């Protein structure tokens, strides 16, 4: 019996010592690397203040929130806000537009960026620098500037594109930004123009980690550049491709707010209004803060569920492939 008690005391003492040593280690780490911690402090505070602190107001999804009354004095409505959102035809219209735009953007931008990365990997250093600079440059341009550029380029009167269509092809001017069916595709095709270069850099970085001896062996065996591309390059960056695709699936229900907001108008609401722009108008146009917050919360839950499902099925596919190997 005494032996058992002694053993328990020894275990307890070891646990206490581990806790003390861990706290001492953390304190020593803070002291030794204080310059690094001070360096990341602004980023930490900004995330804390602008990302986590506003989550307190998530409780407004169960309230009829009034800014004058505050959270405490606003009336509790339960799930009424969810009922209003899911019975609102304008919400479902924005939801459909969101899916349409994001699915096509993903289906176009994802393969274009992979193809661009393969081109950068295969081309000479001189061409690589020129192409990489030219394709990643649009990523650093604000959507407000891009909106102004495209409004001038696509203007029905005096715009470059319509001038070419009218004078060279003898067609009528096309109202790209005021006609719903054209507006959608302007938004969709702007996405690869802006983001393909950025994603290509990520894929190209993954390609640079591939063991070059694989290409040397393939060359000796008579494999050309195309066969090496399909049987070495792409399989070796499969993990990166799958990971990025899983992350992109979550954005299917999260629309490009800045892009659409800078270019749309009431004329294209039926085709161009997305969930973010609709909830923005609810909050700051009609002052229905609770409904707008409810939409944002539902959107986040759906996006998380899609990412988890995509990750689950990707894991299943990887396991089945591993069994075949």
Image (cartoon, helix red, strand yellow):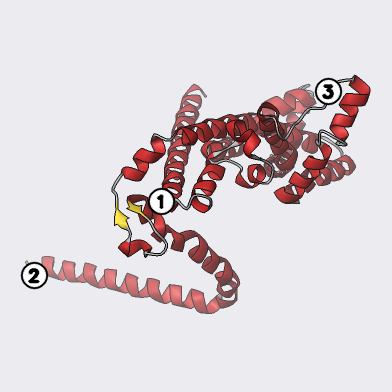
Residue 207 in percent (x, y) is at 70, 39
Disc number lying in front (2 or 3): 3
How far is the residue under mark 2 from the one under mark 3? Answer: 98 Å
Disc 1 secondary structure class: helix
Furthest residue in direction bottom, as rendered: 31
Q: Which residue is mark 1?
A: 290
Residue 314 in percent (x, y) is at 49, 31
Q: Earlier in the sequence, mark 2 or mark 3?
A: 2
Residue 135 — which label?
A: none
Q: Identify the residue shown where x is 64% and y is 34%.
A: 268
Relative to residue 272, is residue 76 depicted above or below?
A: below
Q: Earlier in the sequence, mark 1 or mark 2?
A: 2
Relative to residue 8, is residue 91 depicted above or below?
A: above
| Crowd around label 1: few <14 · some 14–19 · many ≥20 (10 Å) | many
Q: Which residue is mark 3?
A: 172
Tell me, yes or no, if residue 213 can be seen here: no
Disc 3 secondary structure class: loop
| Crowd around label 2: few <14 · some 14–19 · many ≥20 (10 Å) | few
Q: Identify the residue shown where x is 60% and y is 35%.
A: 269
Kindly check if marks 2 and 3 are in contact, taking CB atoms under 8 A apart as contact: no
Q: Which residue is mark 2?
A: 2
């Amino acid at each position: 019996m005494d032996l058992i008690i002694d053993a328990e005391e020894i275990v307890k003492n070891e646990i206490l010592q581990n806790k003390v040593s861990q706290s001492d280690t953390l304190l020593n780490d803070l002291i030794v690397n204080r310059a690094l911690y001070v360096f990341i402090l602004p980023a930490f505070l900004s995330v804390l203040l602008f990302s986590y602190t506003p989550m307190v107001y998530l409780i407004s999804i169960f309230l009829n929130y009034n800014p004058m009354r505050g959270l405490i004095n606003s009336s509790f409505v339960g799930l009424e806000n969810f009922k209003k959102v899911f019975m609102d035809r304008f919400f479902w219209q924005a939801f459909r537009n969101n899916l349409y735009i994001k699915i096509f953007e993903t289906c176009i931008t994802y393969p274009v960026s992979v193809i661009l990365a393969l081109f950068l990997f295969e081309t000479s250093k001189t061409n690589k620098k020129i192409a990489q600079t030219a394709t990643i440059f649009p990523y650093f341009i604000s959507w407000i500037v891009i909106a102004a550029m495209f409004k001038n380029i696509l203007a029905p009167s005096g715009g470059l594109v319509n001038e070419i269509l009218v004078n060279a092809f003898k067609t009528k001017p096309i109202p790209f930004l005021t006609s719903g069916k054209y507006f959608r595709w302007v938004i969709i095709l702007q996405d690869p123009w802006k983001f393909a270069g950025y994603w290509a850099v990520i894929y190209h970085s993954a390609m640079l980690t591939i063991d070059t001896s694989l290409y040397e062996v393939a060359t000796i065996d008579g494999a050309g550049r195309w066969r090496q591309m399909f049987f070495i390059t792409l399989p070796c960056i499969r993990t990166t491709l799958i990971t990025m695709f899983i992350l992109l699936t979550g954005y299917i229900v999260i629309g490009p707010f800045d892009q659409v907001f800078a270019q749309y108008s009431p004329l294209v609401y039926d085709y161009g209004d997305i969930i973010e722009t609709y909830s923005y108008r609810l909050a700051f146009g009609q002052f229905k803060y609770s409904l707008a917050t409810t939409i944002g919360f539902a959107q986040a839950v759906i996006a998380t569920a899609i990412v988890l499902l995509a990750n689950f099925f990707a894991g299943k596919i990887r396991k089945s492939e591993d069994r075949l190997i």
